């Protein structure tokens, strides 16, 4: 499944301020890796947000968020955010900030 270039561009712009990130095509989408750890991604027209297990239930309560079940099995700590919930750059930035806050607690790989 191809990923939304427009959403990928917006995520890229938000992440470009960080020197410790890289992009990788993965899962038929685009992943943004911080210090060796997956942080956010774009699959189709949705954002993949790695919020962590502690923030998972709260994230699922947000508009347009749903479980990340890419493999057919729900992955606790990860959510999809549908494109309808990402029209505003501030909202997208908020999701990215949440993900960065979690990933920054992980050891670098």
Image (cartoon, rainbow, N blue to C red):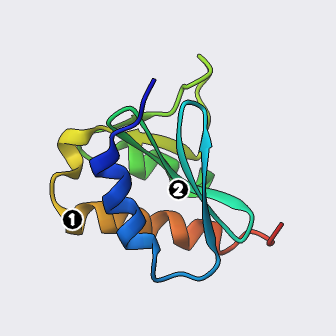
Q: Quadrant of residue 32?
A: bottom right
Label 1 to label 2: alpha-carbon separation? 18 Å
Disc 1 vs disc 2: which is toward the camera?
1
Looking at the rendered structure, the number of numbered marks drawn on it comes to 2
Residue 29 percent location from the top left of the image: 51, 37
Residue at (29% x, 60% y) in the render: 92
Q: Which mark is residue 62?
A: none
Q: Is residue 62 left or right of residue 3?
A: left
Residue 4 percent location from the top left of the image: 33, 40
Which residue is the site of mark 1? 89
Residue 94 percent location from the top left of the image: 33, 67
- Residue 65 drawn above or below residue 91: above
Front in this rendered view, residue 76 or 85: 85
Callout 2 secondary element: loop
- Residue 50 drawn above or below residue 109: above
Front in this rendered view, residue 13 or 88: 13
Mark 2 neighbour density, 10 Å: few (under 14) some (14–19) many (20 or more): many
Residue at (34% x, 58% y) in the render: 9
Residue at (51% x, 33% y) in the render: 68
Residue 50 percent location from the top left of the image: 55, 52
Mark 1 neighbour density, 10 Å: few (under 14) some (14–19) many (20 or more): few
Quarter of the figure that contains the N terminus: top left
Most extreme residue toward the top, as rendered? 72
Q: Is residue 77 left or right of residue 84?
A: right
Q: Is residue 101 left or right of residue 81?
A: right
Callout 1 secondary element: helix
Q: Which mark is residue 51?
A: 2
């Amino acid at each position: 499944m191809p990923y939304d270039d427009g959403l990928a561009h917006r995520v890229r712009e938000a992440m470009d301020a960080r020197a410790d990130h890289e992009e990788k095509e993965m899962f038929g989408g685009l992943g943004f890796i911080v210090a060796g750890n997956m942080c956010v991604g774009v699959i189709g027209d949705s954002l993949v947000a790695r919020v962590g297990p502690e923030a998972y239930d709260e994230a699922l309560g947000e508009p347009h968020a749903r479980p990340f079940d890419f493999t057919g099995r729900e992955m606790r700590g990860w959510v999809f955010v549908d494109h309808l919930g990402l029209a505003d750059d501030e909202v997208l930035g908020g999701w990215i900030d949440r993900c960065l806050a979690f990933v920054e607690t992980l050891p670098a790989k």
